[in-house]
């Protein structure tokens, strides 16, 4: 980690106008959560199913063989599809086969709604950023770092603090990764969100003086995202930057001479 810190500092000082005045290391807290939820899969309705639904919608069909003869297909196919559609609530048989309101809806969209499935996913959330982090990122080295000075007590964070909209959005993006025009999977309902663990994400903070622009600013490297973190930088700027000119005044004068 120390080698990475040196590399970042060297990168920041590539310009002769930029001088690193101070640096420090600390960690902010992220939480792993286990989310239980249900999904529904929609697949493109095949031509035969559409024709059968339209037939029972427009005609009085009493027996499967009538439908098979009308459509010119094997009786076995018709019986199988009628069983599937009845189980899915698309058609009912009360002496005469008829389409349901759900059947009309799915016929209109051309997508067949399958049974609900229960799923679980592990997500990583950062309360400081108020967003989810990429769970696929490799875990940073766990070190006993000082906590970030503008972070509230991490132990008081609860899963109920997660925005419902952001959770729905994150799960939607997760389940829709493999969606195609033929098959769509969507989140139906979030059942439960449980905390698994919390861990520190190491960060490197640098205070920089640009002699050409006479400007002081912070750059903070987030080792989890492996990039400069504008959210954390803004927190530091808001709370501290107004005092830096006095704090670093002597050093600034040295760089001007």
Image: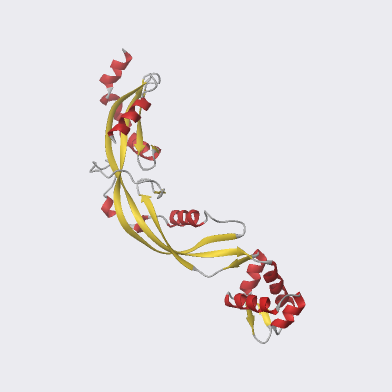
Rendered view: 248 above or below 181: above
| Pick the front one: 12 or 6 | 6
Describe residue 8's horizontal placement relative to residue 250 as left or right. right
Residue in view at x 32 percent, y 33 percent: 4
Residue 166 at what x, y percent from top left?
44, 53
Which percent across, then down, holds residue 5?
Answer: 31, 32
At x 33% / y 52%, what residue is drawn? Answer: 31
* Depicted 78 relative to depicted 166: above or below: below
Q: Position of residue 257 (x, y in %)?
A: 31, 12
State the image coordinates of residue 177 (x, y, percent, origin top left): 52, 53
Say left or right for 73 vs 24: right
- Give the residue at x 63% y 72%: 103
Count the marks.
Answer: 0
Using the rendered image of the protein, determine whether residue 60 is visible from the camera's viewpoint. no
Q: Quadrant of residue 45?
A: bottom right
- What residue do we see at 31% from left, 16% from top? 255
Q: Quadrant of residue 17?
A: top left
Res. 222 image quadrant: top left
Residue 104 at least partly seen = yes
Q: How is the image coloured?
A: secondary structure
Q: Quadrant of the N terminus?
A: top left
**209 left or right of 95 in image:** left
Identify which residue, 13 or 66, lies in the foreground: 66
Residue 194 in the image: above or below residue 48: above
Residue farthest bottom in this picture: 95
């Amino acid at each position: 980690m120390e080698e990475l810190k040196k590399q970042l500092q060297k990168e920041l000082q590539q310009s002769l106008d930029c001088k690193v005045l101070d640096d420090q290391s600390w960690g902010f807290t992220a939480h792993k959560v286990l989310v239980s939820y249900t999904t529904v899969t929609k697949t493109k309705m095949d031509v035969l199913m559409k024709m059968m639904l339209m037939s029972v919608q427009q005609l009085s069909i009493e027996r499967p063989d009538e439908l098979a003869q009308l459509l010119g297909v094997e009786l076995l196919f018709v019986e199988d599809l009628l069983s599937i559609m009845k189980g899915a609530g698309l058609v009912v048989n009360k002496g005469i086969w008829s389409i349901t309101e759900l059947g009309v809806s799915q016929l209109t969209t051309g997508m067949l709604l399958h049974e609900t499935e229960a799923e679980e996913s592990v997500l990583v959330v950062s309360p400081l950023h108020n967003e989810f982090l990429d769970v696929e990122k490799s875990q940073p080295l766990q070190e006993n770092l000082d906590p970030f000075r503008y972070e509230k007590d991490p132990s008081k964070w609860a899963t109920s603090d997660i925005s419902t909209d952001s959770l729905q959005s994150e799960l939607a993006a997760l389940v829709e990764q493999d969606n195609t025009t033929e098959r769509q999977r969507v989140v139906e309902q979030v059942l439960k969100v449980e905390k698994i663990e919390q861990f520190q994400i190491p960060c490197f903070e640098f205070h920089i003086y640009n002699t050409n622009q006479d400007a002081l600013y912070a750059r903070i490297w987030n080792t989890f995202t492996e990039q400069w973190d504008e959210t954390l930088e803004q927190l530091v700027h808001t709370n501290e930057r107004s005092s830096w000119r006095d704090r670093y005044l002597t050093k600034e004068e040295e760089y001007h001479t």
